[in-house]
Amino acid sequence: MTEKLYYKDSHMAEFKATVLSCEKEKDCFVITLDRTAFFPEGGGQSADTGIIGIARVLDVREKNGEILHYTDRPLPVGAEFEAAIDREQRLRRMQNHSGEHIVSGLVNATFGFDNVGFHMGRECMTIDFSGELSWEELQDIEKRANEVVRSNIEIKTFFPESEELSAMHYRSKLDLTENVRIVEIEGIDKCACCAPHVSRTGEIGLIKLLSVQRHRGGVRVELVCGMDALDTVRVMQENVTGVSNILSVKRHETACAVDRLLADQQRYKERLAGLSLGLAKRIADSYGSAENICVFDNILDETARRELVNMLVEKCSGMAAVFSGDDENGYTYIIGSRSIDLRAAARDINTAINGRGGGKTPMITGRAGASRETIEKFFG
């Protein structure tokens, strides 16, 4: 069995190890070592990456108690190599995972809800809790979680004996009976977990909850911790600062300013819609009776273009069509008729104007790739 150095020292980033086996598997090589600090995927935490000698470690998995290192090249069996994990990646993941334990422990102790799902993604973590929590309740959890960080409590990891484990109260998604590793933050949380963690809560840094939404009878919470939290807050600050500069308001006033902007935008949209419908009526009034009527327009909104078609079909015995666009980028179209089954005629129409689209009998919509001259000639 490979000696698991990550359980002896979660901060170990460099070590020496001897290659016990190396086998080709598809596009990579599977290497086992006599000892390793590379953590395999588990407990919601992804596998470490790094190097063994000149071989790049792409993935790490555990199978039947053996740690398998998937590398980009082979290494000779029996040789000893210097190895190193991606230290920054490991530290960030430990900060996030230890922070998640604090939040889950506080939620469990305060509300009795279980952590029923945990995922550590590229941008943030998600925790699924078994009951509903309001944003105000989670804000209190966030405050208390950061107070735990400030208290710099030791994070203990150990494998209790069977009798000790059976008498112990701890969080676990599975019914475990042997080789159970416990991660304990005294007074805050005690949880079964196989992943590496920081040594003290002070190493976690900032714990920041980002959002909450209902999920399968409970809630899903997004959060980030440590350096990932710093990066996230920095991006949020840059965006808020950008909005405040654009709107010429203070950063803490951006939400109110955006609300006002959206309200103004809605009023302008309603006014524009009214003007657009008025213009559509004027355009329709400018046409007399005809077999087909074809209009090209880049001013009316879609609702007004549809209304224009409805008004024009009353004036023609064939088809009324409104096109919007240009020869370079193509056109969108709305075509209506009171006398022609447009659903049946759509194929012939699209063939003539290099188009794609369809709809029901009185009206079809789509796109056309033909030139304006070709379209006008077709509707003649």
Image: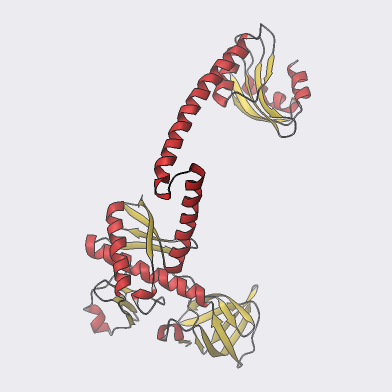
In the image, 380: left or right of 83?
A: right
Q: Residue at the left extreme?
A: 167
| For residue 158, above or below residue 146 | below
Image coordinates of residue 36 in percent, x first then y, are: 50, 85
For residue 223, what is the image quadrant?
bottom left
Is 55 in front, or is 234? 234
Tag count:
0
Residue 43 shows up from this direction = no
Q: Quadrant of residue 229?
A: bottom left
Residue 110 image point, x, y percent: 22, 62
Q: In the image, is 248 to the left or to the right of 375?
A: left
Residue lying at 51% horizontally and 20% vertically, measured from the top left: 274
Compared across the picture, whether 361 is left or right of 45 comes to right
Tell me which colouring the rendered structure shows.
secondary structure
Near-viewer residue (130 or 49) = 49
- 327 vs 339, left or right, is right
Residue 159 visible within the image: yes
For the point 62% across and 85% down, the residue is 53
Residue 87 coordinates in the image, percent (x, y): 51, 77
Which residue is depicted at the point 35% across and 52% down? 216
Which residue occupies the extreme top position in the image?
Answer: 289
Please tell me in which quadrant of the rendered image residue 286 appears: top right
Image quadrant containing the C terminus: top right
Question: Relative to 213, does residue 34 appear above or below in the rendering?
Answer: below
